[in-house]
């Protein structure tokens, strides 16, 4: 991560961005190494966005367009994940470690978070078994 911006300044800039660019967005999170305070010089900024309606799978450019706009706004590389179609384990990491940047529809956000956590904890025994098997099969 470019050290020109302090963590607090970056958070403020991202929040300001989402105040002015929120059409169709339920909420957005900062997650990853920047959110955990573990960013290094080459780290990008990871943003996860929940949209009001799930974007069609063919619109992969949706996250790219938002990422480009964010990069121009903060002057640093940004990677955007669309929570509506993100894998269960990624959504869990965002909710566990992320910082909420904006919340334009709290009831929709809470409903999503409850459903996502339920899905993760339903899947957790299988994830643990998979991780155990893959760890034990490594030479």
Image (cartoon, helix red, strand yellow):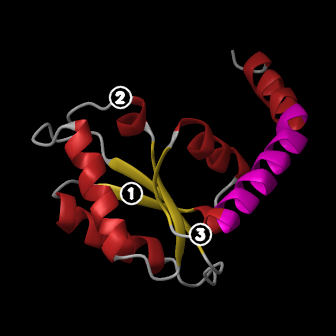
Q: Quadrant of the C terminus?
A: top right
Q: Main secondary structure of the magenta part?
A: helix
**Magenta stretch containing residue 130, yes or no?**
no
> Residue 39: x, y in percent?
31, 32
Stretch in magenta: 107-125
Q: CA distance from mark 1 to mark 3?
A: 23 Å
**Magenta stretch containing residue 109, yes or no?**
yes
Snapshot quadrant of residue 51: bottom right
Which disc number belongs to residue 37?
2
- The residue at 65%/61% (across/down) is 109
- Residue 85 seen from this side: no
Tag 3's secondary structure?
A: loop
Tag 2's secondary structure?
A: loop
Tag 1's secondary structure?
A: strand
> Residue 52: x, y in percent?
61, 78
Q: Residue furthest left?
A: 4
* Sequence-first tag of 2 and 1: 2
Q: Is residue 97 positioned above or below 95 on the image?
A: above
Q: Is residue 131 positioned above or below 49 on the image?
A: above
Q: Is residue 116 left or right of residue 63?
A: right
Which disc number belongs to residue 79?
1
* Sequence-first tag of 2 and 3: 2
Q: Is residue 136 left or right of residue 76?
A: right
- Residue 53 seen from this side: yes
Q: Is residue 1 left or right of residue 31?
A: left
Residue that mark 3 sits on: 105
- Look at the numbered discs 1 and 3 and tell me whether their residues touch, using CB distance below 8 Å: no
């Amino acid at each position: 991560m470019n050290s020109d911006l302090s963590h607090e300044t970056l958070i403020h800039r991202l929040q300001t961005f989402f105040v002015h660019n929120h059409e169709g967005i339920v909420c957005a999170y900062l997650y990853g190494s920047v959110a955990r305070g573990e960013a290094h010089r080459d780290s990008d900024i990871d943003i996860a966005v929940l949209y009001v309606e799930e974007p069609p799978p063919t619109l992969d450019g949706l996250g790219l367009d938002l990422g480009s706009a964010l990069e121009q706004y903060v002057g640093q590389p940004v990677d955007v994940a669309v929570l509506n179609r993100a894998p269960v384990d990624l959504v869990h990491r965002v909710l566990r470690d992320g910082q909420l940047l904006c919340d334009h529809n709290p009831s929709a956000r809470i409903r999503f978070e409850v459903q996502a956590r339920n899905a993760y904890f339903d899947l957790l025994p299988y994830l643990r078994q998979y991780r155990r098997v893959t760890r034990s099969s490594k030479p």
